[in-house]
Amino acid sequence: MASITLQNLAHSYAPNPQGEADFALKEVNLKWGDGEAYALLGPSGCGKTTLLNIMSGLLTPTRGRVLFDERDVTAAPTAERNIAQVFQFPVVYDTMSVRENLAFPLRNRGVDAGIIAARVDRIADMIGLTPLLGKKAQGLGADLKQKISLGRGMVRDDVNAILFDEPLTVIDPHLKWELRTQLKALHREFGHTMVYVTHDQTEALTFADKVVVMNEGRVLQIGTPQELFETPAHRFVGYFIGSPGMNFLPATIDGAFASIGGERVDLGKSYGSLEGAVEIGIRPEFVKLTSSNGLPLEINRIQDAGRQKFVNGNVFGAEVNIVMDASEAIDAGMTRLAIEPAKISVFQDGWRVEPKGAE
Ligand SMILES: Nc1ncnc2c1ncn2[C@@H]1O[C@H](COP(=O)(O)OP(=O)(O)OP(=O)(O)O)[C@@H](O)[C@H]1O
């Protein structure tokens, strides 16, 4: 295993890139810690696969360096990097049995037959393939074939890292949860460095110790699920994580107070005075409908979803979502929005601003 460092990495698919717009990866500096489980999360087209393929050696970056521990592997071919990769769609040898498929990466390296058998049995047991070990892969459904691909990715214990590129896309929804749990268990047991690409926040937050959030070719934040939820570094992270995402209200800030549409909101902490596009961000879970204090709210709709109610409205023209307990009543006089000061994030030109101190 190894830590993987990406230094000033940028990639363009254009033969003669001119400006920033020509780069699928703008400028990435990132260190993947040895033995940690990461999710690489971002919307379609943000550069996740490009980044993964640069790490595995399928792509050579236009600029920058890739280091495995201290070794520069930027120009090294995939075979030299000792990396296992699991793709979105199954890569399986149809004419081989499930056992032979799982054993393939080990047999290829001349591992002792006894060790191979033990390792294959262990992996098959963990991902539920034991009853099928003797069967030919041909004729198995996409779910099972992808399980074989996952198993083959995990079977070697000497890899520097295992890279998963949206590996559960073809898996039936009810099996996804189970496989994610098993991948986590395999990580706990074997301690590989794992990078798991997904555009699905549930998948990212349940799989990983740390989540790397990307958008438009940039890494915006690396953090635990809790950090991404509580202190998103960029408004995109606030919006992308959470369901619904963070609410944003344009504001002017003076010390420990925000002015929103002329109304004063206590921030609890001082931010000095901020220039540029300033907003406050507050999660739908930390705002409340009230009938007295708060910002004026126009309610558009109320949705009952079992244990929770989702309220959608507008505050001075900005869309706001509120998540409340289903047992809380809503009455006609509730036309104000109260905000928990301790849960407010302040953003300047999209980036979160740290408070200067309590006031
Ligand atoms: N071979 C290629 N040639 C030209 N452009 C490409 C190529 N592969 C990807 N791109 C472009 O690079 C950008 C990043 O693509 P990439 O596949 O890395 O994103 P992604 O986040 O993995 O998306 P998805 O989740 O849809 O797979 C996109 O704009 C994409 O159109």
Image: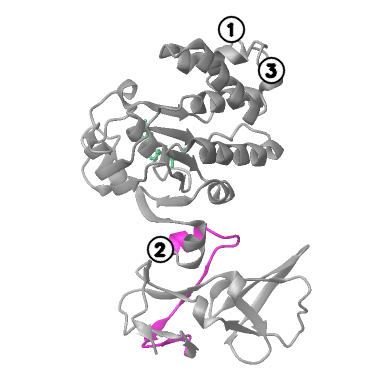
- Ligand 1 found in image quarter: top left
For label 2, the SS is loop
- x and y percent of residue 336 in the render? 63, 85
Which residue lies most toward the top here?
A: 95
On the question of residue 92 being in view, the answer is no
Which residue lies most toward the front here?
A: 114
In space, the residues marked 3 and 2 are separated at their CA atoms by 47 Å
Question: Relative to the observer, which residue lies in front, 295 or 14?
Answer: 295
Q: Which mark is residue 95?
A: 1
At 34% from the left and 50% from the top, the residue drawn is 218
Look at mark 2 in the image and give the residue it sits on. Answer: 234
Residue 258 location, quadrant: bottom left
Question: Relative to the observer, which residue lies in front, 161 or 13?
Answer: 161
Quarter of the C terminus within the rendering: bottom left
Q: Which residues are magenta?
A: 234-262
Quarter of the N terminus within the rendering: top left
First reached walking from the N terminus: tag 1 or tag 2: 1
For label 1, the SS is loop
At 33% from the left and 24% from the top, the residue drawn is 78
Left or right of 333 in this view: 150: left
Q: Is residue 46 above or below residue 311?
A: above
In space, the residues marked 1 and 3 are separated at their CA atoms by 14 Å
Q: Is residue 341 above or below residue 68?
A: below
Disc 3 crowd, CA 10 A, few/some/many (<14, 14-19, 20+): some
Amino acid type of the residue tagged 2 in the rendering? His
